[in-house]
Amino acid sequence: DGGITQSPKYLFRKEGQNVTLSCEQNLNHDAMYWYRQDPGQGLRLIYYSQIVNDFQKGDIAEGYSVSREKKESFPLTVTSAQKNPTAFYLCASSKDTFQYFGAGTRLSVL
Amino acid sequence: GQNIDQPTEMTATEGAIVQINCTYQTSGFNGLFWYQQHAGEAPTFLSYNVLDGLEEKGRFSSFLSRSKGYSYLLLKELQMKDSASYLCALIMIYNQGGKLIFGQGTELSVKP
């Protein structure tokens, strides 16, 4: 089945630790996106990539890093510089106008 | 900027009609989306407006007026399963990579 797979579904981070959230798509989409969602809020854009080996900062990129070495994969690293990482993280991909979302990863701090 | 405003929460009765409004201030966008999101799940697509006017899709309709900076989502024959958060989002294509700018979402509770 074609789709977007995010893993893990739940993730816990210790103080000072970097953690990486996985996002894989087999839809052959060029563009991929990472959003953060806090309780009772809409989604905010962290990073996006329109093509392999290229990506741009979104509205809240500080404390996060990404890579786009393959078309299918767009991992997000939450670094220790992100002081408030607890949130629901959503990955999306698109070919034209419509974005398709993964099921999300819920990150919490221990 | 692209400030997008939606009511935080609404309550309606099963079988009724509810209208969820979205107002925005933006320097330019390609279209406006409405998504439905159940707690802890990914947003799912409901509708997309590019031109002014009404788009109808079964029990759901969405309206856009670019001159007024206004959109609404109309839900008819409400069902309990329609209890969810409804997100309004603008898509920015020109030189902005097709990114979506979301409102904060409207939490709809459908009561028996």
Image (cartoon, grey):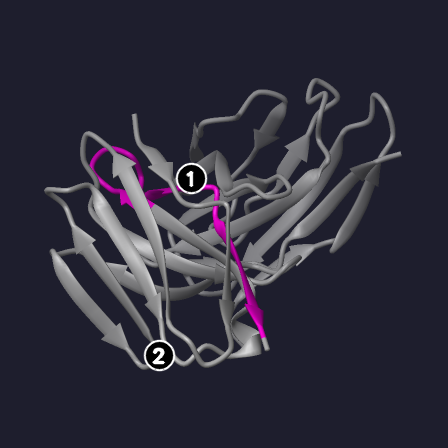
Q: Which residue is mark 2?
A: B59
Please, what is the three-letter code of the amino acid marked with disc 2?
Arg
- Residue A109, given in percent of the width and then of the height, sits at 83, 34
Q: Are marks 1 and 2 in contact (CB under 8 Å)?
A: no
What's the mark number on residue A49?
Answer: 1
Judge by depth and name the residue closer to the eye, B98 or A55: B98
What is the crowding at mark 2: few (fewer than 14 residues within 10 Å), some, or many (at least 20)?
Answer: few
Judge by depth and name the residue closer to the eye, B50 or B74: B74
**From mark 1 to mark 2, how far is it between C-alphas?**
35 Å
What's the mark number on residue B3?
Answer: none
Judge by depth and name the residue closer to the eye, B2 or A72: B2
Instruction: Tell me the residue at 36%/76% (across/down).
Output: B76
Q: Is residue B38 left or right of residue B87?
A: right
- Tell me the quarter of the picture where residue B83 sits: bottom right
A6 relative to A81, above or below: below
A101 relative to A44, above or below: below
Residue under mark 1: which chain is it in? A
